[in-house]
Amino acid sequence: MFGRWKRNRALRKDLADGYDFRGRDLSRASLHDLDLRDKRFSDASLRYCDLTGADLRGVDLQGADLTGAYLTGAQLEGADLRGACLKGAYLIATNFLDAALAGADLTDTVYDQATTWPDGTQSAHRPE
C-alpha cells in the first residue's frame, strides 16, 4: 500500500511540472482533482485511474486507454478523445462540451443526466 502512495505522490509532482506524457503507463494512479489542462496523454495508459474532479480541458487523449477510469465530475471541455478507449469508464456529471469523441469506444460506460455531451446536451442517453 505504501508503494502505491509513494508512486502517486511522485506521479502527481511529475504531472504538475511536466507537459508531455504521451505513451506513459499511468494505470491505476490517483489523479483526482488535479489541474491537467492542455497536457498531452495521447496513447497513454490511464486504465482504472481516478480522475474524479480533474480539470482536463483541452487535453490531448487521442488513442489513450481510459478503460474503467473514474471521470466523475471531470472537465473535458475541448479535449481530444478521438480513438480513445473508455470501456467501462464512469462518466457521471462529466463535461465533454466541444470535446472530440470520434472513434472513441464508449462501450459499457456509466453516465447520467448531468453528463454534458460535446453538443452541449445533458442527458442520460448518449447522443448518436
Image (tube, rainbow, N blue to C red):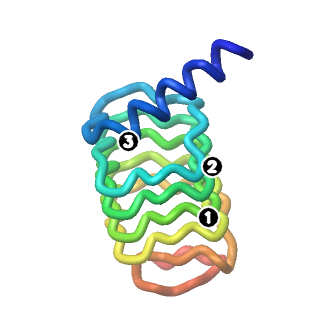
The residue singled out by tag 3 in the image is 64
Which kind of residue does numbered mark 2 sit on? Answer: Tyr
Q: Please give left or right for residue 122 compared with residue 57 in the image.
A: right
Which kind of residue does numbered mark 1 sit on? Answer: Gly
The residue singled out by tag 2 in the image is 70
Instruction: Determine if residue 88 is in view.
Output: no
Instruction: Determine if residue 45 is in view.
Output: yes
* SS under mark 3: loop
What percent of the width, then of the height, locates residue 38?
29, 55
Q: CA distance from mark 3 to mark 2?
A: 14 Å
The residue singled out by tag 1 in the image is 73
Residue reaching furthest to the right: 1
Mark 3 or mark 2: whose residue is earlier in sequence: 3
Q: Please give left or right for residue 123 compared with residue 26 in the image.
A: right
What percent of the width, then of the height, locates residue 112?
69, 72
Q: Which mark is residue 40?
A: none
- 44 to 37, vertically: above or below: above
Disc 3 vs disc 2: which is toward the camera? 2
Residue reaching furthest to the top: 3
Q: Tell me if label 2 and label 1 are in contact, CB under 8 Å.
A: no
Nearer-the-camera pick, 30 or 91: 30
Q: CA distance from mark 2 to mark 1?
A: 9 Å
- 63 to 120, vertically: above or below: above
What percent of the width, then of the height, locates residue 36?
40, 51
The quarter of the rendered structure image containing the N terminus is top right
The crowd level at tag 3 (other Cα within 10 Å; few <14, some 14-19, many 20+) is many
